[in-house]
Image (tube, grey):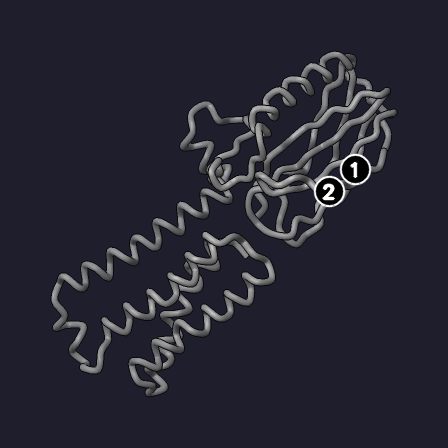
């Protein structure tokens, strides 16, 4: 489940449950308890199973009760309470709702990054580049892994150049959560002839996580290697491709947005 859906969908569910409780003639207090209790309990159970991180959990368990409390304050015992309320409390209610929306958006971008289509518009000279727009502070880095990554990238580029290989990866741009997709890797030499003696594998991971359970690609001939992948959740994913041949190993990295 995406952060956007769980946060703002849960807030909308809180408002709907409050309205349903009032229609069922529950008191203002118990309607508010129902409105915040059901989505909060449901999300806590979901978070225990998936554990998206303490910051994300905190945002949710604060957002749902906040909406319920605001509705409780806005629609008190008197029918005319909302109309007679002073503008200052109304302004505070709007402020906290806006603040929750801003925090939710920032946490979404921090963990998932900007959608690629939006990043192409907002970031200069971004077309055709491998973008990582998630916040560095929420991604796990151990020691000097970030600095080592730059050196590893240059080293792999040098290996490809020395081998005379060109690598083309297809099928990573239209992945959907919970669905199997075909990914093909084609390796060619300088004369566009397929390299058929390589061992190719790939693995998926979230930004900042190490890849696990690499998948071996089947050789289809003419330098084409194929596998099916099944990303579990939507959001930004990294695809790590490993090419091995003649004692040399090359690691490539691609980012993609899973819908």
What residue do we see at 68% from left, 40% from top? 211
In the rendered view, would you say 4 is above or below 27? above
Determine contact: label 1, label 2, CB under 8 Å: yes
Residue 140 located left or right of residue 229: left
Please provide percent x and percent y for residue 7.
44, 58
- Say which element carries label 1: strand
Q: Residues within 10 Å of mark 1 (few under 14, many from 20)?
A: many
Tag shown at residue 22: none
Query: Would residue 190 be found to the left or right of residue 17 on screen?
Result: right
For residue 68, above or below residue 140: below
Q: Earlier in the sequence, mark 1 or mark 2?
A: 2
Whether 164 is drawn above or below 84: the answer is above
* Residue that carries the numbered disc 2 in the rendered image: 182
Residue 157 location, quadrant: top right
Question: Which x, y percent locates residue 162?
Answer: 75, 12
Q: Quadrant of residue 199?
A: top right
Quadrant in which the N terminus is drawn: bottom right
Between marks 1 and 2, how big is the CA–CA gap? Answer: 7 Å
Q: How many marks?
A: 2
**What residue is shown with label 1?**
226
**Pointer 2 local density, CA inside 10 Å: few below 14, some 14–19, many at least 20:** some
What residue do we see at 42% from left, 68% from top? 13
User: Residue 216's x, y, as percent?
Assistant: 81, 38
Residue under the image location 78 percent in, 16 percent down: 189
């Amino acid at each position: 489940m995406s952060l956007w859906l769980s946060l703002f969908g849960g807030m909308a569910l809180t408002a709907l449950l409050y309205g349903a409780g009032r229609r069922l003639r529950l008191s203002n207090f118990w309607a508010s308890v129902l409105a915040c209790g059901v989505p909060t309990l449901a999300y806590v159970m979901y978070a225990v199973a998936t554990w998206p991180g303490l910051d994300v959990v905190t945002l949710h368990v604060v957002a749902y009760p906040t909406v319920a409390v605001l509705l409780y304050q806005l629609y008190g015992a008197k029918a005319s309470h909302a109309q007679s309320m002073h503008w200052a409390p109304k302004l505070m209610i709007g402020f906290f709702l806006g603040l929750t929306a801003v925090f939710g958006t920032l946490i979404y971008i921090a963990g998932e990054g900007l959608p690629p289509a939006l990043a192409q518009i907002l970031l200069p000279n971004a077309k055709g580049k491998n973008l990582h727009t998630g916040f560095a502070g929420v991604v796990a880095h151990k020691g000097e892994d970030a600095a080592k990554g730059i050196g590893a990238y240059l080293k792999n580029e040098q290996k490809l150049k020395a081998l005379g290989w060109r690598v083309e990866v297809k099928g990573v741009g239209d992945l959907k959560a919970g669905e199997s997709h075909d990914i093909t890797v084609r390796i060619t030499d300088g004369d566009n002839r397929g390299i058929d003696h390589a061992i190719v594998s790939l693995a998926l991971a979230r930004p900042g996580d190490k890849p696990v359970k690499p998948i071996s690609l089947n050789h289809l001939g003419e330098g084409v290697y194929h596998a099916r992948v099944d990303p579990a959740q939507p959001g930004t994913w990294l695809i790590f491709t490993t090419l091995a041949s003649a004692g040399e190993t090359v690691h490539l990295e691609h980012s993609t947005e899973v819908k």
